[in-house]
Image (cartoon, rainbow, N blue to C red):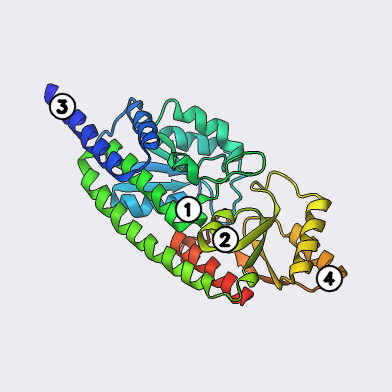
């Protein structure tokens, strides 16, 4: 019994060493370490680890970092808006039976927030984006955090590290495997980040780099890749756009002679149609530049059904339309 306790303690110590070595923000590391060590249950040894996640973006990170050691059950599929998604009784049952739960956080899963927070008080549940350095998290005019951190690939890579560290602390026997897989995937993400910067920078002159979307999900993208972004709705689709919001955006598009706007796969297109009609009434035809993946990835089995494929699709669609 003593040897088992010693091994567990050594495992946690090793995983904590990995954690503090990977995260530069001390307060964040402390918060993460306390969260994991407060969980009473540890890995039973059963394989694979049953992981339940909310969105496709989080699911893809877990699959890449966990590999064959994890079995991922994703609650929200393609075209599902996480801002509006409500947990079913089946979802709650899955969450309660999971070994580990990962969700994005920063109030992305608005309708599920209470369920997820309550779950986190008794199980291994992690709001992964909430372990980022707070200074890197954008907020809206009401100081609400913008949850769409995955649109900065470099920032989302830090979330991959959070997941790798969490799995290593839950399953210390395989901590080295999680570390290697996390490092490998983060190297891939670094290449995609550099690629996106190059492609967007090729849209010239810079004044043409204006991204208009259905809701304000692309501010991290704008900051990371130097492109001006505006959305009809705010950072959550739960808030309806007003006539004034649409008219203000029409004024902007006409004044800047923006030639293309973009719809999102998980957001109703009616506001975008109103925006186009408003521009046409002002003598300016604005085309649909294409469909972007914002709060949900593509269907399983397609390139856009992976995080990297989704990012590449968006970058190429934006660049083609604005050029």
Question: In the image, is 255 to the left or to the right of 305?
Answer: right
Asked if 10 appears above or below 179 in the picture, the reply is: above
* Residue assigned mark 4: 280
Residue shown at 39% from the left, 60% from the top: 189
Q: Earlier in the sequence, mark 4 or mark 1?
A: 1
* Residue assigned mark 3: 6
Residue 161 or residue 305, whichever sits in front? 161
Secondary structure of the residue carrying numbered label 3: helix
Residue 39 or residue 16, whichever sits in front? 16
Mark 3–mark 2 distance (CA, rounded to whole Å)? 47 Å
Q: Is residue 1 visible?
A: no
Mark 4–mark 3 distance (CA, rounded to whole Å)? 71 Å
At label 4, counting other C-alpha atoms closer than 10 Å, the crowd grade (few under 14, some 14-19, many 20 or more) is some
Mark 4–mark 1 distance (CA, rounded to whole Å)? 36 Å
Whole-percent x, y for residue 106 in the image: 54, 40
* Residue assigned mark 1: 57
* Residue assigned mark 2: 293
Question: In the image, is 144 to the left or to the right of 42?
Answer: right
Q: Earlier in the sequence, mark 3 or mark 1?
A: 3
Mark 4–mark 2 distance (CA, rounded to whole Å)? 26 Å
Q: Tell whether label 2 touches label 4 (CB within 8 Å).
A: no
């Amino acid at each position: 019994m003593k040897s088992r306790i010693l091994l567990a303690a050594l495992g946690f110590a090793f995983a904590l060493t990995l954690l503090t070595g990977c995260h530069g923000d001390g307060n964040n590391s402390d918060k993460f370490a306390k969260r994991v060590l407060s969980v009473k249950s540890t890995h039973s040894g059963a394989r694979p680890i049953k992981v339940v996640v909310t969105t496709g973006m989080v699911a893809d990170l877990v699959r890449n970092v966990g590999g064959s050691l994890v079995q991922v059950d994703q609650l929200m599929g393609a075209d599902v808006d996480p801002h509006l998604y409500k947990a079913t009784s089946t979802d709650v049952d899955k969450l309660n039976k999971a070994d580990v739960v990962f969700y994005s956080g920063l109030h992305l899963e608005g309708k599920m927030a209470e369920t997820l927070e309550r779950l986190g008080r008794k199980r291994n549940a992690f709001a992964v984006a909430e372990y980022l350095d707070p200074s890197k998290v954008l907020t809206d005019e009401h100081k609400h955090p913008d949850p769409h951190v995955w649109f900065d690939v470099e920032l989302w890579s830090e979330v991959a590290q959070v997941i790798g560290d969490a799995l290593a602390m839950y399953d210390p026997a395989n901590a080295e495997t999680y570390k290697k897989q996390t490092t490998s995937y983060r190297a891939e993400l670094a290449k995609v980040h550099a690629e996106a910067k190059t492609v967007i920078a090729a849209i010239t002159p810079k004044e043409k780099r204006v991204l208009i979307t259905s809701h304000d999900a692309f501010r991290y993208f704008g900051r990371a890749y130097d492109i001006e972004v505006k959305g009809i709705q705010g950072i959550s689709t739960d808030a309806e756009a007003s006539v004034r919001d649409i008219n203000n955006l029409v004024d902007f598009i006409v004044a800047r002679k923006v030639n293309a706007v973009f719809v999102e796969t998980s957001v109703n297109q009616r506001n975008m149609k109103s925006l186009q009609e408003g521009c046409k009434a002002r003598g300016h035809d604005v085309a649909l530049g294409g469909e972007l993946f914002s709060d949900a990835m593509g269907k399983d089995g397609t390139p856009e059904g992976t995080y990297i494929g989704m990012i590449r699709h968006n970058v190429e669609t934006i660049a083609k339309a604005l050029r």
